[in-house]
Image: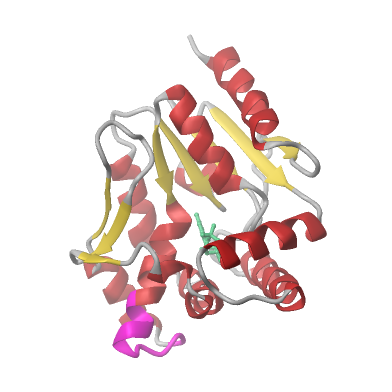
């Protein structure tokens, strides 16, 4: 079974998808981390963010892999060609660069192929922007998470400071709005809710409350 969780930046996707995967014992697939990994490697190699052919080659050759500890369905590490980039993909530099990388159609094609391969034959909770529309249009459960801009900004601020980076609320708000704008208006697979997705506004809800809602959907669709 495939559970697709889409939504804008800091709408609660990661937290909800991880908790849901652990509850259901489904594998968790973090597609945003894959685009971030390509962006991180591009920055490291000094590839210009408008050099689509080089970014495409990089995405194709990057060998992104998730490593798991024991039977935890949530990955512990993400690597690019064997190099651990788990922390580096959360840096402000990657935050600022990732939309440009995710806009390139050939980068997306390489990531989508890899995402479909990762989900072959397993039950999986997949989180991203285009999961219910492009990657898995036949997913059994599709959810589109939203939250108010102020709640999203506070969540992202907490993520940033929790990861050890300095951050100011104003800067976080403008980063989120800029990224939403870029993700929603790009030509290739823009952020948009699938017609058959269930919208869930997470503003003011606890993680458990949101996970309960999605879990009920999963149980109702299970044969
Ligand atoms: O969810 P996130 O913030 O880690 O995503 C990082 C970036 O990758 C975000 O700007 C949008 C992009 N992305 C995408 O275009 N398609 C996906 N399926 C997942 C993420």
Q: At 81% from the left edge and 53% from the top edge, which residue is drawn?
A: 148
Quadrant of the rendered image containing residue 169: bottom right
Q: Quadrant of the N terminus?
A: top left
Q: Position of residue 15 (x, y in %)?
A: 56, 44
Q: Horizontal and vertical percent for residue 87?
A: 39, 66
The reply to whether residue 138 is visible in this rendering is: no
User: Which residue is painted at 61% across and 69% down in the image?
Assistant: 186
Residue 77 colored magenta? no
- Is 128 above or below relative to 63? above
- The colour mode here is secondary structure
Rendered residue at 40%/87% (across/down):
51
The image shows residue 132, relative to residue 138, as above or below, that is below
Count of labels in the image: 0
Q: Give, as a single range, the part of the protein colored magenta.
A: 41-50
Asked whether 36 or 101 is in front, the reply is 36
Please say if 138 is above or below 68: above
- Where is residue 45 shown, x and y percent of the image? 29, 86
Q: Is residue 87 above or below residue 40?
A: above
The reply to whether the magenta stretch includes residue 48 is yes
Residue 208: x and y in percent read 64, 30
Say which quarter of the image contains residue 82.
bottom left
| Residue under the image location 38 percent in, 75 percent down | 40
Q: Is residue 1 left or right of residue 116?
A: right
For the question of whether residue 42 can be seen, the reply is yes
| Outermost left residue | 82
């Amino acid at each position: 079974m495939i559970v697709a969780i889409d939504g804008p930046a800091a709408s609660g996707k990661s937290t909800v998808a991880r908790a849901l995967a652990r509850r259901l014992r489904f594998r968790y697939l973090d597609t945003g981390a894959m685009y971030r990994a390509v962006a991180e490697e591009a920055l490291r190699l000094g590839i210009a963010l408008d050099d689509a052919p080089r970014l495409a080659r990089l995405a194709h050759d990057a060998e992104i892999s998730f490593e798991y500890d024991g039977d935890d369905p949530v990955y512990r590490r993400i690597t690019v060609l064997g190099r651990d980039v788990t922390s580096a993909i959360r840096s402000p530099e990657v935050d600022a660069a990732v939309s440009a990388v995710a806009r390139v159609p050939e980068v997306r094609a390489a990531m989508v192929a890899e995402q479909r391969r990762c989900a072959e034959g397993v039950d999986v909770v997949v989180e991203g922007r285009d999961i219910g529309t492009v990657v898995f249009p036949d997913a059994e459960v599709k959810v589109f998470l939203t939250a108010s801009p102020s709640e999203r900004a506070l969540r992202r601020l907490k993520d940033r400071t929790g990861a050890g980076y300095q951050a100011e609320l104003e800067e976080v708000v403008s980063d989120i709005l800029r990224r939403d704008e870029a993700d929603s208006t790009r030509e290739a697979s823009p952020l948009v809710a699938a017609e058959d997705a269930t919208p869930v506004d997470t503003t003011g809800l606890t993680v458990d409350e949101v996970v309960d809602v999605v879990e009920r959907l999963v149980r109702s669709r299970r044969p």
